[in-house]
Amino acid sequence: MQFGKALGTACSTFAVTNIDDLFVLVTFFTESSVNKNLTPLKIAIGQYVGFTVIIIISMIGFGVAQAISSEPIGFLGLLPIMMGVWGILALIFPPGPDEEEEEEVGNVKAAGIRSILKVASITIMNGGDNIGTYIPLFSQAEGTEIAVYVVTYYVLLGVWFLVAFLIMKQKRIVEIAQKYARVVVPLLYVGLGIFIVIKSHCYPWSIERIDERFLGGPGKAILGTLTAIILALCISTMVWFRMRKRAANQHTTAGTDVEFQREDTIRESGTSRSGLRESDISVAGIDEKSMGGTEVLSIVESKGR
């Protein structure tokens, strides 16, 4: 094995297949500026977990490449698109203060795990070209060469993470990210999903397979119809969920306001009653004093006589 050649091959293949990963990392760091659950540590863990899955799939070898093509992985790019749509709906139907409190008070550990899984899943979705490149590379390499490749990939992944982190650490960039992140992040996720779908060639690949099996070339019509139905169902479900949650929060808020009004009314009535009682007591005290004074005067007059 020629170490220099193996190292050069590893660096070149990583750069070619992970240039777009910088965009993904910047997207995560932009979201982390407004999402407390998505910290740089969790981004790093999720990135390494996702990349490890890609390496494991690639190391299985050329046999898996015959059974599982890398192109269908691109259909998972629809998930980031749905995540972006969910974020856009959050802008259209903003969560109430009760929802925000629930999110903050919720299980922090579970939220952290979800953040890691989200980063890992998107890394895997974006790894179709990695798998397509690494499988034939590993299948033709020796054991020591594969070790050099893998170690180099993990080191360069850390460098990629550091570059994205330093980009987002710039004060001006952080200010812009914090100001516009809630609007930009959903759009970035939509763009990321579209990029994954286009880059993977999953639609042309599927259209060719469908056209080979059916006469008349119905691949485009079938895929277009299925995609439209899936997107329509997902988006309508998300809209329904958002509106239902918003209506429930408004109902809860209205009920709370009514209870507060009742409590205020009870307090006011209690205060007025106590005021009346105090006035009655004071009047009674005055009467007693006046009566007592009259009795004293009568006693004095009787003694004078």
Image (spheres, grey):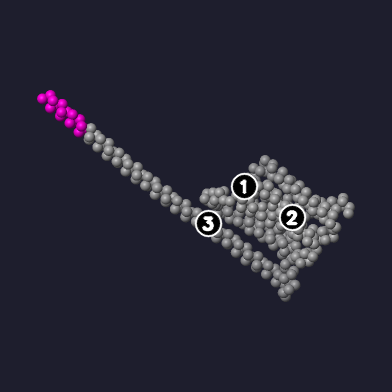
**Which image quadrant: the C terminus?**
top left
**Residue 209 x %, y %:** 74, 70
Which residue is at the front of the view, 77 or 295? 295
The residue that label 3 is drawn on is: 245
The residue that label 1 is drawn on is: 36
Residue 46 in view (yes/no):
yes
Q: What residue do we see at 82% from left, 54% from top?
A: 147
Q: Dot 3: few (<14), some (14–19), or many (≥20) neighbours within 10 Å?
A: some
Which residue is at the front of the view, 279 or 177? 279
Distance Cα–Cα, label 2 vs label 3: 38 Å
Q: What residue do we see at 58% from left, 59% from top?
A: 238
- Tell me which secondary structure the magenta stretch mostly adopts: helix
**Residue 157 x %, y %:** 75, 50
Q: Dot 1: few (<14), some (14–19), or many (≥20) neighbours within 10 Å?
A: few
Residue 85 picture quarter:
bottom right
Q: Dot 2: few (<14), some (14–19), or many (≥20) neighbours within 10 Å?
A: some
Q: Are marks 2 and 3 in contact (CB under 8 Å)?
A: no
Q: Which mark is residue 52?
A: 2
Tell me the magenta residue range. Answer: 290-305
**Residue 2 x %, y %:** 89, 52
Q: What residue do we see at 57% from left, 48% from top?
A: 104
